[in-house]
Image (cartoon, coloured by chain):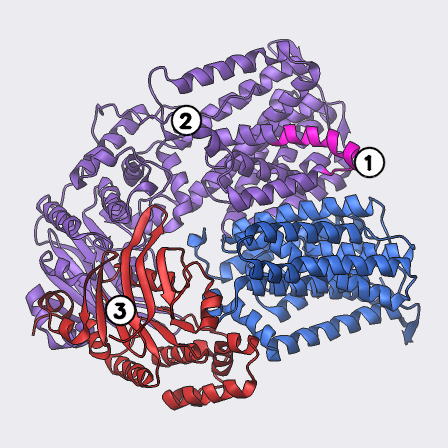
Amino acid sequence: MAEALLQVEELSVAYGQVEAVRGVSLHVARGQIATVIGPNGAGKTTLLGAIMGLLPSRGAIRFAGDRIDGRDTEALVRRGISLVPERRELFADMTVQENLELGGFSRRRAGESRAALANTMEEVFALFPRLKERLPQLAGTLSGGERQMLAVGRALMGKPKLLLLDEPSLGLAPLITRDILHTISRLRESGLSVLLIEQNARAALQTADYGYVLETGELSLEGEADRLLHDERVIATYLGRH
Amino acid sequence: MAAPLPNPAAVTGPARGLSPVHAVAAVALVAVALAPLLAPAFYVTLLNYIGLYSLATLGLVLLTGVAGQTSFGQAAFVGIGAYTTGVLTTQFALSPWLTLLLALALTLALGYLIGRITLSMGGHYLPVATIAWGLSIYFLMGTIERFGGFTGITGIPAVSLFGFTLDRERHFYYFIWVVVLGALWLCANLLDSRPGRAIRGLKQGSGMVEAFGVHTTNTKTAVFVLAALLACLSGWLYAHLQRFVNPTPFGINQGIEYLFMAVVGGATSVWGAVLGATLITLLKTWLQDLLPKLLGQAGQFEMIVFGILMIVLLQHAREGLLPFLQRWLPRRPRALPPAEVPLARRTMPSPGSAVLRVEGARKTFGGLIAVNEVSFEVAAHEVVGLIGPNGAGKSTCFNLISGALPLTSGGIRFLEQDVSAMSASAIARLGLGRTFQHVKLVAAMSVVENVALGAYLRGRTGFIRSALRLNGQEERAAFAEAMRQLERVGLAAHAHDAAGSLPLGKQRIVEIARALAADPILLLLDEPAAGLRYAEKQQLAALIKALKTDGLTVLLVEHDMEFVMGLVDRLVVLNFGQKLAQGLPEEVQANPAVREAYLGA
Amino acid sequence: MDSTIVALLAQDGLTNGSIYCLLALALVLVFAVTRVIFVPQGEFVVYAALTMASFDGARTPGTVWLLLALGGAAWLADTVKLRREPRRMALAWLATAAPCVAAAGLVAWVAASKAPFVVQALTTVLAVTAMGPAVYRLAFQPVASASVLVLLIVAVALHFVLTGLALLFFGAEGVRTPAFTSASFSFGNITVSGQSLLVYAFTAVLIVVMAVFFRYALFGKALRATAANRTGARLVGISPDFAGRLCFTLAAAIGAVSGLLIGPITTVYYDSGFLIGLKGFVGAIVGGLVSYPIAAGGALFVGLVESFSSFWASAYKEVLVFTLIIPVLLWRSLSTTHSDEEE
């Protein structure tokens, strides 16, 4: 197994007295895609929110060996973690170009040049040529698929080492989902590590290297993605029988 | 301090028998009764003011703390009470008792009018509007010549009661505090009643209470008017205590101070009003004495301290100070005596008859089509599952059926009646009960009270009878019914816990009990299994099957395929707002289009 | 009522309206970015006018103490909050406490050194601007994620504090600052005062500067991004604290300039801020607290209503202005879809 870029140990998240995530331990190896699958309400989005510092949590989170739990979201962005949230959270009344520029906000504040950002933007266009056509358009007027591309593109503008993806298939037609997951596989080849959260279990396991199953806030199963694809329980619950 | 100490039983329900709470209340009552005989005159004056402020703050506690409608304009209604009697007793020589009635009538009318207009505004527009009319009324009082401008009106007569003139502060003290304690008793009764539970549910959003048949606009307006009447009463008392009025005590700053009192005390209990009024009044007196000496100049520097106190409180203890005191008092579960007459029940439709027909339902949000020409039927005693990927339009579909959202086009028939244009509360009245995807229980109420709210439409007592506690029989019946439903869903052991303290999965089940308390024909369940563990899911499935046996019809939205497959009679599959398939679970599961869209094959 | 009076009233109304317009823009900005309905915006106006008046009267402005009080409190709050993280603590000091203390020093020095008018004016703007981030830090940062209603009550409480502090540090006397210019110009039979023209010019320039800032500057875009989507902004590394501090700095600066402009027109007391701010607020509400151009137009309209009603029914001037807001609120509330689940 490759060295872990992200390591989560015994993570718990509570809303008031209700624990939505209980004692979850997982890791994402460098240059690999890990996925967490599970039904709605299992706590998948909560898990990502906690890793990203959007929700308070208990337990240890390590990134490249350093403890990052309790750090601000903004500090994690600077360290090289980007989240593409379930709801996309784009800046709807700003243009595609402005959305992408703001994706590089931390880098600009850290003193990187406009030229460096322009380079990254070209890389994003190489992945999603559609975005280049839509540059002056307002993000709120994009189609569902284009919004998802913009959300991923905006996250990539921060040049992350780790990309957290929350339900990229949500509300998208199967063909578009396939495209986006394909693009994510290509990113892995450029050295990016990915933690992918998906309800569409089959597509997720086909894309990922390693998989976890989250049920009612706890991990119930984990293993190589290929192995999970053929696991009896996973098939029965998440994939349906052929 | 002579003010009665807070009593949690007042809100959680009447406790029977002698308890430490009663002992504290008795001591407090004696203290209130003896205070003017023992305390120096200065403190009697202070206690009088505390009483007056408590009364106005009590209104705000109901309006802002309990019903969640923030108002900065409470002082204006105090002014209306004071000025009505001021003008009418001095210039028309009317009796103060007559002016009291006139002032209350005027407040009722004005409160209704202003309330209707203001409360139709949502979110932050409401409090901003209260600042606006609060200022307008204040400037009016200072401008109208008959009102004596900013100098005011002098020579207001004293009140006489049975030939005894209350012209001394010590005598007026008893008058004020009898009124205050009476108002507290009435308001505490009101909150612990059928309309009271509806008021306490308002903060969870109008969608929740409307699903149980509460008319939210009417309820909010009634609370607004009640708050205004309490303020008016306070103003009338003020005018006859001071025997003089001018606009200053009715300005926006005083309105803000009333809100401070409510927030400082703790705006969710009637006793918070007394606590807040007492603390702020004492603090103000003390600071007005201390600060000018300390700072070497005169001025209203207590504002600085109040402001800081308020900011710190909102940053660290948003519930106010009352909860800190309540911690020291024992909490007793409410007594649930048996009901003499159980609540009447509906007859369920015969098996197979149509309960729900969705006919070409369509809903658009702006340009987005959320539900597109969806049609399906649900027959009596059936359990039907509505499934589909995230964003497929299931919840929108649910909200169309329950009347929470209006249809763009198409029709919905419930029990052969066209309900397309009906409000949520009207549809609830016909026999539709529902749960919510995001649990909407009143966290501070006990589980059994939450469930009793579900029986809202099966009772009739209004504000006045509830406040006077003339609702005993109906209350007993409602609580007996609530307990029956809790036993049905297996949560009777948690009846007296605060609803917010239960795990999310159990809260979903409480929602089912609450929906059942309405005695529905059709039950809509929105993702009931989300957040449940395996064993709990089994129990839930067993419960739904039992409900079917009892004659209920169930339509449920669910994600958990395993759970749905073993439970439902039929499935309807939505995708991108359109119906993709329907039929028996096995048929749907084998349908290639469904596999493609939903299972991601 | 002849045309000369109409022109005079219109000029008066537009002059006040311009100032309300600046305040309305600040209120829209603050609300859009932080969801705070910033009731005490007018207090910045008052602080600026009172500071200028003290300079003019060759007294040491109470601003020095006010800045030290705010800066000291912010320093204490950051020191306690971040006691375990020395690096972040130092950064926090630099962001809030340090500007206050530096500005206090500057004000004291300018007051002592009989500096020229322009230096006094610039110092006033700097001093009041420095209060912005401190006020945000102390009152709003700890409750930044609370509901709009809680933020509103905090804002109202803050209004009490800031008004009380104004009384403490500046006293209860009203002031009027010297006019920037005594020139006046005639167009036919209409005379326009130089001061009015200056107000119009300042307002126009400030609006253009703001527009450019929001359209082209990285920080301007960051503020728009925060207004558009708070979570999205955090995910690209724009912290809510940073955005909050930045927009309160701008709001304080706008308030300060407004104070300089209004000082020569109206007598300003320690507690005038509430009504001045509220009139800007009426304008902002016309724009639904979201639209800058409609807010600006609304504020000008408020100025005109005020001016003309002071002619026809001067006693009812305030009643009219504040009653006017209710139908506007009603229309705004009904035309926006809001969810009452916001609690």
The chain under label 3 reads B
| Upstream in sequence: badge 3 or badge 2 | 2
Question: Which quadrant would residue A124 be assigned to in this image?
Answer: bottom left
Question: Which quadrant would residue B566 be assigned to in this image?
Answer: bottom left
- Residue B585 spot, x, y in % from top left: 9, 64
- Residue A175 spot, x, y in % from top left: 25, 83
The residue that appears at 47% across and 44% down in the rendered structure is: B68
Q: Which residue is mark 3?
A: B392
Which residue range is magenta in the image?
B280-301
The answer to if B296 sits in the magenta stretch is yes
Q: Predominant secondary structure in magenta?
A: helix
Give the quarter of the figure containing the C terminus of chain B.
bottom left
Q: What's the amino acid at mark 2?
A: Ala
Mark 1 and mark 2: Cα distance apart in space: 46 Å
Badge 1 and badge 3 both on one subunit: yes
Mark 3 and mark 2: Cα distance apart in space: 46 Å
Q: Residues within 10 Å of mark 2 (few under 14, many from 20)?
A: many
| Upstream in sequence: badge 1 or badge 2 | 2
Badge 3 and badge 2 both on one subunit: yes
Query: Nearest the camera: B236 or C63?
Result: C63
The chain under label 2 reads B
Tell me how many marks there are.
Answer: 3
Left/right of residue A56 with respect to residue B574 in the rendered view: right
Query: Nearest the camera: B287 or C258?
Result: B287
User: Which label number is shown at residue C224?
Assistant: none
Q: Is residue B533 above or below residue C264?
A: above
Chain letter for purple, please: B
Determine contact: label 3, label 2, CB under 8 Å: no
- Residue B148 spot, x, y in % from top left: 78, 34
